[in-house]
Image: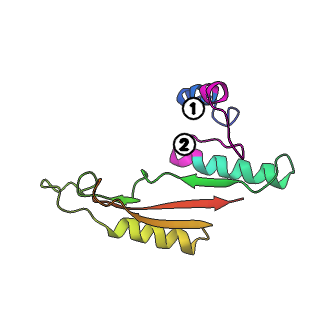
Amino acid sequence: MRKLFPENEKLLRWLDLAEEKISYQGLPSRIAWLGYGERAKMGLALNRLVRDGEISAPIVIGRDHLDAGSVASPNRETESMKDGSDAVGDWAVLNALINTAAGGSWISFHHGAVLAWDIHFMRVWLS
């Protein structure tokens, strides 16, 4: 990740802190928030590393539910309605269906219940 994103100071700082402060239980893992183009670049790099035998599969790549079009909440995502009443739930549903059709390894759809009255979906790819 350091080689792919040397200009991403927040990511580099996070990697340093995680290496120093986090001890793992079970399988080793990493978490980092990457931008839209960065995620695609990282996914291709991981696929190449698995293909070339530099690292071994399985590798799971997940996506946070804070991305655009993945959440509908009357308290946050309101399509600019002044009264906050129009949380357009179809984007989260459509994104879940599209990612299922595109071969996502794990697609889940959730309801936030009382916390935010939201619906959102998560997706994971397995390399």
SS at mark 2?
loop
Categorize mark 2 by other alpha carbons within 10 Å: few (<14), some (14-19), many (20+). Answer: some
Question: Toward which corner of the image does residue 100 lie, by quadrant?
Answer: bottom right
Residue 107: x and y, percent?
Answer: 53, 67
Question: Toward which corner of the image does residue 84 lie, by quadrant?
Answer: bottom left
Q: Residue at x 68, y 32 (%)?
A: 2
Q: How would you classify the magenta stretch by its main secondary structure? A: loop
Q: Earlier in the sequence, mark 2 or mark 1?
A: 1
Between 29 and 86, the residue placed more toward the observer is 29
Position of 102 compared to 127: left or right? left
The amino acid on which the numbered mark 2 sits, given as a three-letter code, is Leu
Residue 12 inside the magenta-drawn segment: no
Quadrant (top left/top right/bottom left/bottom right) for the N terminus? top right
Question: From the viewer's perspective, is residue 58 above or below residue 94?
Answer: above
Categorize mark 1 by other alpha carbons within 10 Å: few (<14), some (14-19), many (20+). Answer: some
Quadrant (top left/top right/bottom left/bottom right) for the C terminus? bottom right
Q: Residue at x 83, y 55 (%)?
A: 51
Residue farthest to the right?
A: 53
Q: Residue at x 51, y 44 (%)?
A: 35
CA gap, disc 2 and disc 1 = 8 Å
Task: State the residue position of label 1.
Answer: 11
Residue 20 inside the magenta-drawn segment: yes
Question: Toward which corner of the image does residue 57 lie, by quadrant?
Answer: bottom right
Contact (CB < 8 A) between labels 2 and 1? yes
Position of 83 compared to 10: left or right? left
Residue farthest to the left?
A: 83
Between 22 and 35, the residue placed more toward the observer is 22
Bounds of the magenta span? 16-38
Residue farthest to the front?
A: 25
| Count of number-bearing discs | 2
Residue 77 is marked as none
Task: State the residue position of label 2.
Answer: 34
